[in-house]
Structure formats: C-alpha cells, structure tokens
Image (spheres, grey):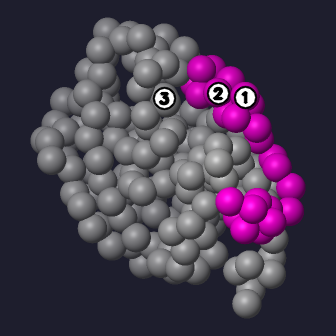
Amino acid sequence: MISNNMLDDIKDVLFSKEDLDEMVKRMGKQISEDYKDKNLLLVSILKGSVIIMADLMREITIPAEIDFMSVSSYGNDTKSSGRVRIIKDLDKDIAGYDVLLVEDILDSGKTLSYLMSILATRNPRSIKICTMFDKPHRREVESIKADYAGGIVPDEFIVGYGLDYAQKYRNLPFVGILKEKVYSE
C-alpha cells in the first residue's frame, strides 16, 4: 500500500495503471513487428526505465537481448544539467545489433543525444529510441525524436512508474503530476 505522504504530494493522476499497461502492450506489439528478423538489443537507461523495461520486454514476442546503462544528468534537480556522466556502461559489444534505447522520459533530448553519439561509434546496425513518455515541447535537441512513445505528457513534473524526484516516487503504480511545493522548497 502506498503511503498517504506520497499520495498527498500528487496534484493529479495523468495515467492509471491500466493506461500504462495499454501503452506498453501497444509499444511491445509494434516493436515485435518492426524488429522481426532483426538482432534486437534492448538497452535500459537506468534507473528510471527499469519498470518500463521489465514490462516492455514481456510484451515483445520476438527474440531480444537486454543490457543496461546508467547515466546522470539530473542529480536531485528537476531539469537536466546538460552534463551527462556514464555511471555504468554496457556490458556487451553492440556491433551488429539493432539497438533500442528504452527510456522513461524524453525531455530536452540532451542525454539521449549524447548517448546516441557515443553508441553510434560502436558500430550497431541501428539505434532507435523507445520512451514511455515524450515531452516534445521541452526538446532542446531537435534531431532527437522518439521512434516509440507510450504517451505525450504536458510540461509538468511527473513521477511514478519509474519516474522520480530525488529518488522517490518511482514505486507509484500510476503516473502523476508532482505538486510544485514538493520540489520548490
């Protein structure tokens, strides 16, 4: 059971658990069709995408491998600093793979732009982006676009289903808008 303290910090629920399940099923079906007969490697960008990755890979019906990267560009702030640090790199050589980066939210595009430029030097067959939530109106790197997106979100600070503020709220089973008083204090 989710504590009332966390629930009290939520202004509105944007997506229910059922909404999230439908988004993941839709993306999993499309990815399965698009990557049929390809060498699919799902790369989860930790920590935010861990829940999405677990649900998404169960909806993909074709052979796929997985790996994980951990990067930092936010810290405990509400927007990307633009400085990306790789905390954990991939374990596998991605040469010849069709890489699908699995991300929780595509916001400014700075982090994914940096990652795509680094990963492109490792000779994958292709690199695409799958994000649970897309915030296109916040995009600062126009060349970065989601190839697969669960949904488009407003310019609000959202938490739940892997998304956090200061490492909290990831375990909410829905996605909600965090009250501004929580992160402006």
Q: Amino acid at mark 2?
A: Asp
Question: Where in the figure is residue 37, as x and y percent of width and height?
Answer: 32, 9
Question: Where in the figure is residue 126, as x and y percent of width and height?
Answer: 34, 33
Q: Amino acid at mark 3?
A: Leu
Residue 10 picture quarter: bottom right
| Disc marking residue 182 | none
Q: Separation of disc 3 and disc 1 at Cα?
A: 14 Å
| Disc marking residue 56 | 3
User: Magenta segment, which residues?
Assistant: 3-27
Does residue 90 appear to the left or right of 34 in the view shown? left
Category of crowding for the residue at label 3, using alpha-carbon neighbours closer than 10 angstroms: few (below 14), some (14–19), many (at least 20)? many
Q: Is residue 138 visible?
A: no
The residue where tag 1 is placed is: 18
The residue where tag 2 is placed is: 21
Q: Residue lying farthest bottom?
A: 185
Question: Where in the figure is residue 83, as x and y percent of width and height?
Answer: 42, 78
Q: Is residue 121 above or below residue 51?
A: below
Magenta span dominant secondary structure? helix
What is the secondary structure assignment of the residue under circle 1? helix
Category of crowding for the residue at label 2, using alpha-carbon neighbours closer than 10 angstroms: few (below 14), some (14–19), many (at least 20)? some
Q: Which residue appears at 76% of the width and 54% of the height?
A: 176
Q: Amino acid at mark 1?
A: Glu
Category of crowding for the residue at label 1, using alpha-carbon neighbours closer than 10 angstroms: few (below 14), some (14–19), many (at least 20)? few
Question: Where in the figure is residue 51, as x and y percent of width and height?
Answer: 48, 42
> Which circle's residue, 3 or 1, is located before the other in the chain?
1
